[in-house]
Image (tube, rainbow, N blue to C red):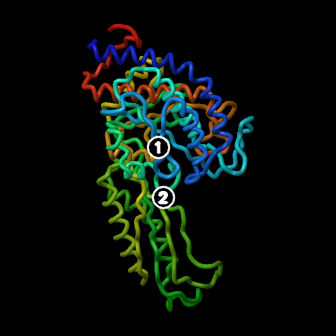
Amino acid sequence: MTPTLTRLTDLAARWNLALERELPAARRLRRELHAAPCLSGQEHPARERLVGALSDLISFDRLADAGAVGRTGPADGPSVAIRAELDALPVTELTGASFAASGGVMHACGHDVHQAALVALLRAATRLDLPLGLVGLLQPREESYPSGALEMVQAGVIAEQEIAHVIGAHVHPGVPRGAVASGGGFINAAADEIEIRISGRGGHGAYPHDASDAVAAISHIAIGLPEVVRRTVSPLRPALISVGTLAAGEGAANVLPAEARILATMRTTDPADRATLFDAVREMAERTAQAYGTTATTTRIEGEPALINDPTLASGADDWLARLGVDGAEPMRSLGADDFSYFCDAVPSLMLFVGVETAGEHPQPALHHPRFLPGEDAVDLVARALMAGYLAAAERVLGIEHHRGDSSEPGEDA
């Protein structure tokens, strides 16, 4: 084991002990945060609570309106950032927990857990001699547009803090409880919206030959969208288009409407497929509309890019998780989306998924479900996942040869 790797191994052991001292308070903080959720764009109270929990150790600067950035460790030179999302969802909570939220807003995606874990990890880190800066990103608006992650990147936080890598961790009921999934490459899809508007000539249902039927055109376009995906994107690269809204007419049975509309989500996992698939949809919509004597206008509303994990960071984090006594799991890949992808576009980064369960629920409620409530140990697991990500990133920045297969525990010599 090289001297620098020995130093990181010793750091992991000391950080783990320091974290244990912070976790009881972090679990209490999680309950407090869960009981007082903030909608996207209104996260200022959450930010102030987190900044207050760290104010005796770290100073924060406001960023992206309701967000903030703070740093511990070396004030200059390269750093590794860890992110926590601040926003909750417009969901009425049905968990029955003593600290349940009220008022139709709920942390149904586990962001309260992420926030408390970040506070615990940062507080523990201030007692240590870190080799690189550790930057806390308190990010607003993960659940809505405009993206808080994109605004942070555009504000220049990466260059200002010399961030080499960003680490994120997200609770997920699809991962075995107590395990953490990493995995290099595609993790989440790019998420764009497609709007297709059909314009024709309305008329009477009894005289369709005197009209240009927008309903017939829009129906055939909706049915044809899956075939466009099949004929455009390789089946080895997951992609889909799902129609969420199909609207035409105003409720009459015998009136042929002149206008119709589709709103669909388009998910792609390869950046090259994003433009190609949209172009194919637009061509199909225009030609189908023309066949029915109507016209189609197709618009893409750009969302998050695909979330691509850095393979080296993922492999390194797996090793550090094992050293910290945390089980690994198969990569958690899905066609869901997360604006953490903007950090991945800016610098090589890593999103980890932490396995959790909601006590007493069978089947387990999914993310965004009104009964979703990870147990208290989720705070501990998320904090250790973020720690493993920092250690893997530090290895890479410091140029340490990857140590896969070295099974020594933190603090032991290899």
| CB-based contact (under 8 Å), mark 1 and mark 2 | no
Give the residue type at disc 1: Asp
Can you give x and y, in whole percent of width and height, for residue 238 in the image? 38, 48
The residue depicted at 34 percent of the width and 29 percent of the height is: 393
Disc 2 secondary structure class: strand
Query: Residue tagged by mark 2?
Result: 242
The residue depicted at 66 percent of the width and 34 percent of the height is: 31
Q: Is residue 345 left or right of residue 247?
A: left
The residue depicted at 69 percent of the width and 51 percent of the height is: 104
Query: What is the crowding at mark 1: few (fewer than 14 residues within 10 Å), some, or many (at least 20)?
Result: few
Toward the viewer: 302 or 266? 302
Query: What is the crowding at mark 2: few (fewer than 14 residues within 10 Å), some, or many (at least 20)?
Result: some
**Between discs 1 and 2, the one toward the N terminus:** 1
The residue depicted at 58 percent of the width and 48 percent of the height is: 44
Query: Residue tagged by mark 1?
Result: 61
Give the residue type at disc 2: Ser
